[in-house]
Amino acid sequence: MKVGIGADHGGFEMKQQLAQLLAGEGHEVIDFGNKVYDASDDYPDFAIPLALAVAGQQIDRGILVCGSGVGASVAANKIVGVRAALCHDHFSARQGVEDDNVNILCFGGRTTGIAIAWECTQNFLSARFSNADRHRRRLAKVTQLEAVRSESMPEHNQSQLLSLMTGEK
Ligand code: RB5
């Protein structure tokens, strides 16, 4: 699977460990940074480009780590098409995909140990959306809201957002 991974300083060490474990399992790992430890970096700079790549289907799934996992999940969920969830247990990591079609898993590098994070990651990546009617119905209600939001802010389209963040024209 093509898996994107990203972290700020609070999640840097865990990102490095997860990237190595994922590669060891044969996944194609795309590192959205930070590529070096920088104590003053900001999680949106990594969470938003990764979230855009998931929404644009350039990568299959994403993993984000910040200190608590909270900021990363908040930022990623601003992108239409992203369903990011902060996770601390393997049941939620699996069910989040099966029922809610989660496509980005978030961890707190300061709150969760690597063994639990890896167990969650494996459950997340091996799970598939069930496609059950009741879950499709619930997700449709979320998607409807996204559609209204996109229409009300046409000037904030997602590719413009990425250009703004990367400084590219
Ligand atoms: C950065 O110190 C920290 O606030 C960030 O990594 C994250 O925990 C935010 O939710």
Image: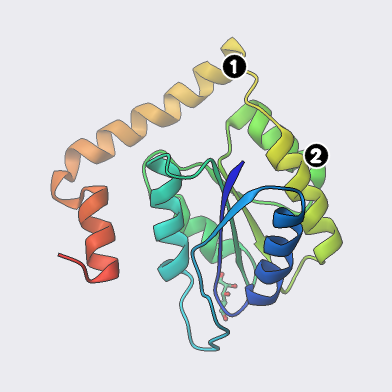
Residue 91's disc is 2
At x 38%, y 50%, the residue is 52
Please provide percent x and percent y for residue 168: 20, 67
Please provide percent x and percent y for residue 134: 59, 14
Q: Nearer the viewer, residue 109 or 167?
A: 167
- Spatial CA distance of label 2 from label 1 is 18 Å
Quadrant of the image occupied by residue 147: top left
Residue 31's disc is none
Up/down of 128 relative to 163, above or below: above
At x 76%, y 55%, the residue is 24
Q: Nearer the viewer, residue 40 or 62?
A: 62
Q: Is residue 137 left or right of residue 123?
A: left
Up/down of 77 relative to 37, above or below: above
Dot 1 beta carbon under 8 Å from ligand 1: no
Outermost residue toward the top?
Answer: 133
User: In terms of secondary structure, where does tag 1 sit?
Assistant: loop
Please provide percent x and percent y for residue 2: 56, 45
At x 58%, y 20%, the residue is 135
Outermost residue toward the bottom?
Answer: 39
What kind of colouring is applied to the model shown?
A: rainbow
Instruction: Characterize the local packing of mark 1: few (<14), some (14-19) or many (20 or more) Cα atoms within 10 angstroms.
Output: few
Quadrant of the image occupied by residue 131: top right
Ligand 1 quarter of the rendering: bottom right
Q: Earlier along the polypeptide chain: callout 2 or callout 1?
A: 2
Q: Is residue 35 left or right of residue 10?
A: left
Please provide percent x and percent y for residue 62: 56, 50
Instruction: Characterize the local packing of mark 2: few (<14), some (14-19) or many (20 or more) Cα atoms within 10 angstroms.
Output: few
Q: Which residue is mark 1?
A: 131
Up/down of 19 relative to 149, above or below: below
Q: Which amino acid type corresponds to the residue marked 1 in the rendered image?
A: Asn
